[in-house]
Amino acid sequence: MGWRRRQPDLSMTQSTALRLTGLSKRFGSVVANDDVSLTLEKGEVLALLGENGAGKTTLMNMLFGHYLPDAGTVEVADENGTLHPLPLGHPQAALAAGVGMVHQHFALAENINALDNITLGSEPLLALKRDRRSARAKIEGIIERSGLSSPLNVPVGRLSVGERQRVEILKALYRDARILVLDEPTAVLTPQEADTLFANIKAMTKDGLSVIFISHKLREVLAFSDRIAVLRHGKKVGEMATKDADEKVIARMMVGADTPKVARSDMAPGAPVLKLSNVSVEGRAKRDTLNAINLTVNAHEILGIAGISGNGQSGLANVISGLAQPSFGTISVDGQDVPKPSPGAMVKAGIGRIPEDRHHEGIVGAMSVAENMVIERLDDPAIQTRGLLKRDAIQTNAERLAKAYDVRGPGVTAASRLLSGGNIQKLILARVFERSPRLILANQPTRGLDMGAAAEVGRRLLEARERGAGVVLISEDLDEILGLADRIVVIRDGNLVEAVNHDRELIGLMMAGEPA
Amino acid sequence: MIRIEPRENPSRAFAFGIPILSAVISLAFAAIPLLAAGANPITAYGEMIKGVFGSVFAVSEMLTRATPLIFTGLAAALAFRAKLWNIGAEGQLYLGAMAAVAIGSGVLDISGLLLLPLIIVLGAAAGAAGMMAPTYLKVRFGADEVVTTLLLNFTILIFLQMMLEGPLQDPMGLGWPQSAPVLDQGMLPPLMDRMRVHSGLILALVLAAIAQFMLARSVWGFKLRAVGENAAAARHAGINVRRSLFGVAAISGALAGLAGVSEVAGLKGYLTADLSPGFGYTGIVVAMLAGLSPVGVVIAALFIASVFVGADSMSRAMGVSSFLADLVVSMSLLCVLVGGFLAKYRILRTKGATA
């Protein structure tokens, strides 16, 4: 295209806080953002939606100066509402212009208190004396106006995740941010904490703060935003007022097609397939630790493990997949004790494992798709005789599985790292389901997948349940658990508590540790 | 600003062409010090080629030089494939050599049909043992094997000197720190009359072929590659990572030990503390040049041996310093490493940061 026509933007008024025009960014041959234009009004909450890899984070990183756009401009309004172009590629300039960003992974120093974390970086380096009193007064003023409360004198390491997030936001506000960007702010919060956060955000917008938040939880987007912008494959594909939107419209816009609904039928549970009795794991961190838990998973049953991330989910997954040895307690599969748990022993006992981090634990990226499909069955005589690999059998097996599980990519002999995230997950599904496991451990099986691939994972899990397998589904996405699980157990501080029903409110409270 | 991006699909011609081009460029770079030394580079390289391929003797010398490099190159390549950084091939080489003279110099006066295999097996076992200890420390305590294997080289060298002035010293050696000679029936037979090239070369080539086959076609090789490329995924898939590491450690050490056996029982006949002019370390260069492929090791070892022998002969013919040989080898390594990097990544210049 030799030329591009731009409509003169008549809607631009004095109240525009931020205007992105024609931003484009490519990484190699991947177009992350293609001619994206976006405006943010003063006092508005804009939800930026899109599947993983749609380019949301890239766009925000260009706004904040972390990435240098290939084309396009960013204009930010000053106190008087006049738009000024922002020098690109300079986070300091973005900060000075009043843009604050809170990343998914917090950037706080854990050993110093919240007050010092908030003021860190906005004080002159060589000042002889720090004016903590006026800093404290300013922060307390912000807390009063916004409701974002957090203890200020306690080392950040001792604060809860929700409090830390509030400290991050306070840090941005302390630097007089007029535009706040939140990257998936509720990923680590309980439903109740998330509601409080959005209530605080609403309060702040009354003072003229403008907010962009990135999310893919449609529920909170519909509940708390004023306007919605949707990105797909790096392009802006839609923009609408939230009051005109519903879940179906947004989902179609994100995916580009209607998403298949996963149908789930009721089913009577069968005999127990996995039993953990009094199992304790002494992990290095809280997320790896289990305290004498008891857990039974039956055939024809999906057991959902709900919980805020880092409450022992890794410990549970490691025990079931054989990576961690319990310091106490027994594990039995189909009534048979597993005396020396190891990954190999668990596979032999009939446990199929879908690991949380599919790139790091799921595949050997440098090895071929075909090799990764047989990596768990190297002692199978169909794959090898007397220590030598049957290459034809491995090749045929891979071609068959790639077809059956729709693994798309440059072919089964290509390195598996060349596959997209969704296709890597399909490779792992093929490897796991192919052996008709008695029990399937699915740890965050849809994290980072687009809606089509996520629905496929759900469908396969339900299929296994139908066949008579038991499924342990660990997920931080409560909606996913509510949609798939027959029973729900909440994990908190390495302890398990079963939820009596599928009540979102109740489970949220249990996740937060309130007595239910 | 300069940005580095991975290339999408490096072509095959690219992957093979880059090392060869790098080798040529390294020769071009080495011409600079040659000019500085007052020699005409073209004549010098002519002398070099003559020194390597000009006669049967020259070829024999080159192959003799390549033999230990194939062993140590294989030792490094296999271990590095599993991300086990064995920098101790030099020490393991001497352990193998010590075992060879300890057994071969008259303790057992048995026929060559038994003595030679025994020397080979025990020499390999000694080298393997030398790599097992650092691997145990790595697996059990997380000790960095780069440090432990490197330091063991010096420990073993001092131990060697002690042995050469003690139990292993030749009683007929007039007090020189050297071992008694290996019995004739314990020697690796030469390949040609009146030439130094010996059957250690055949052993090295056979082992390279076996290594290549096992790596690509065996379950053992599959596990080794999986452990090296992604140990976490290998462990998750039920592969015993420790067992794989110990296995490759033993094989890597054994190959380095065989380099020592081959030098003592194939070439020198007795052991001194200057048996190896750094074959263990040059083996690392060979392995890197080879891209950690066993067949590549053979080619890289021949290339490096040619450069060494050729530069040696050239320096004698032209009257320039023989250190130029080391220079060419170092240049070729740097060029190939940079070339390998450029084959995988492209470097882009971006416009200034401010708009």
Image: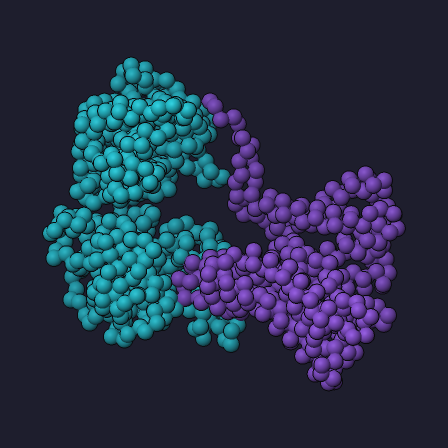
* Residue found at x 47% / y 58%: B142
* Residue found at x 24% / y 75%: A335
Foreground of the two, B146 or B72: B146
Q: Which chain is purple?
A: B
Counting from the top left corner in percent of width and height, residue B297 is at: 66, 60
Tell me the shade of chain A. cyan
Counting from the top left corner in percent of width and height, residue B177 is at: 76, 67
Among all residues in the image, which is located at the extreme bottom?
Answer: B110
* Residue found at x 35% / y 26%: A122
Counting from the top left corner in percent of width and height, residue B6 is at: 52, 43
Q: Is residue A87 above or below residue A223?
A: above
Counting from the top left corner in percent of width and height, residue A490 is at: 19, 55
Foreground of the two, A371 or B197: B197
Q: Residue A56's quadrant in the figure?
A: top left
Foreground of the two, B134 or A338: B134
* Residue found at x 31% / y 32%: A116
Foreground of the two, A224 or B277: B277
